[in-house]
Image (cartoon, coloured by chain):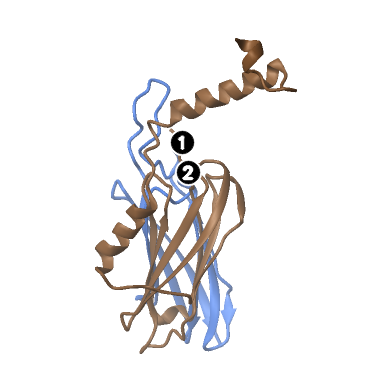
Chain colours: A blue, B brown
Amino acid sequence: MATPTPRVRVQAKAKKGEVVEIKTLISHDMEMGTRKDADGKTIPRKIIKQFVCTFNGKDVFKSDWQPGISANPYMAFFAKVNESGTFEFAWHDDDGSVYKASSKIEVA
Amino acid sequence: MRQGGRPAGATRRRVLAVGALGGIVAALAPRLAVAKPEDVAAAIKKLYGDKKAADGKVKLEMPQIAENGNVVPVTVSVESAMTDADYVKAVHLFAEGNPIPAVATFYFTPLCGKAVCSTRIRMAATQNIVAVAETSKGELYTGKTEVKVTIGGCGG
C-alpha cells in the first residue's frame, strides 16, 4: 500500500481564546489482523495505534486506537487557542513508522 | 419433504436464498468470536476497579441504523468546563459485540476547550456502544447507545 497521506483541516485565523475545530484524515488500511487472504492465511495486523496532536510543543489531544477504528481513520476534535502557533500531528503505525503533518494558525 | 417444509407463499427462489444466507452466517460464525456485554464490564473493571460510573454527562451521537458496519460515525461529547482544575482526562470507547470490545481511548487536556471528538468505527453486528469518561478529579461517567447494523464490518 502506498505511503499513508495525512490530511488536516484547521482554520488559518482565530480570535484569542477561540475554540477551533480540527479535522484530520489519513489514508491507511487499518488491517485488523482477523481477515484472511485468498489462500486462507491470516493477514497480519497493521494499524495506526496512536494519534497525537500538540500545539507549540504542548499536548492537546491524544488517542489510542484498536482495530475497531475504520480504515482511513478520521479524527475530529477541538482546541482552544490563546496564541499564534503550529499544530503538529503524528500518527504512530504498528511497524514503527510515524506519519506527520502540521498546520499553522494565526491568533489576533 | 421439501413440499411439506415450505411455508405458504414462499417461492423456490426465496427458500434457496434463505438457505444460502444461513450457510454464509454459519461459515462466518466460528471466526467471529464476538465479545459479550460482560467483557466490556470486565474491561472497565480492569481500568478502574470497583469504582462505579454514574450515568449521564456522556453523550454518544451515532446513527440509529448503520447500513455499513465498516464505517459507523460516532461523536462523543462529555459535559465539562475543561478548566485546569476540572477537565475530562480520558474517554474509553467500547463495542459490546465486536471481536475486540475496546475500540479507542481519547485523552483530552484543558487545551481542548471542550471534550468533544468524532471518529469512525467498525461494528460487527447490532450492539451497544459504551463510553466511559474519567475526569481529572477521578469521577467516572458513562453513556451508552444502541446501533442496528445491517452489514457487519469485522468479517473475515
Labels 1 & 2 near each other (Cβ < 8 A): yes
Q: Is residue B11 left or right of residue B80?
A: right
Taking the spot 52% from the left edge, 44% from the top edge, the residue there is B70
Q: Relative to A86, does residue A76 appear above or below in the rendering?
A: above
- The furthest residue to the top: B1
Q: Quadrant of the C terminus of chain B?
A: top left
Can see residue A77?
A: no
Taking the spot 42% from the left edge, 45% from the top edge, the residue there is A30
Residue topped by disc 2:
B124
Same-chain check, marks 1 and 2: yes
Q: Is residue A68 left or right of residue A94?
A: right
Q: Relative to B59, does residue B33 appear above or below in the rendering?
A: above
Residue topped by disc 1:
B155
Q: Which label sits on residue B69?
A: none
User: Which three-letter amino acid code belongs to the residue tagged 2?
Assistant: Ala
Taking the spot 71% from the left edge, 22% from the top edge, the residue there is B10
Residue B24 horizontal/vertical position (percent)? 51, 26
Residue A83 horizontal/vertical position (percent)? 47, 86
Q: Chain of mark 1?
A: B
Q: Relative to A12, does residue B19 appear above or below in the rendering?
A: above
Can see residue B124?
A: yes
User: Which three-letter amino acid code belongs to the residue tagged 1?
Assistant: Gly
Q: CA distance from mark 1 to mark 2?
A: 7 Å
Name the quadrant containing residue B7. Answer: top right
Q: How many discs appear? A: 2
Q: Quadrant of the N terminus of chain B?
A: top right
Judging from the image, what secondary structure is the residue with disc 1 in? loop
Q: Chain of mark 2?
A: B
Closer to us: A28 or B65: B65
The 10 Å Cα crowd at callout 2, few under 14, some 14 to 19, many 20 or more, is many
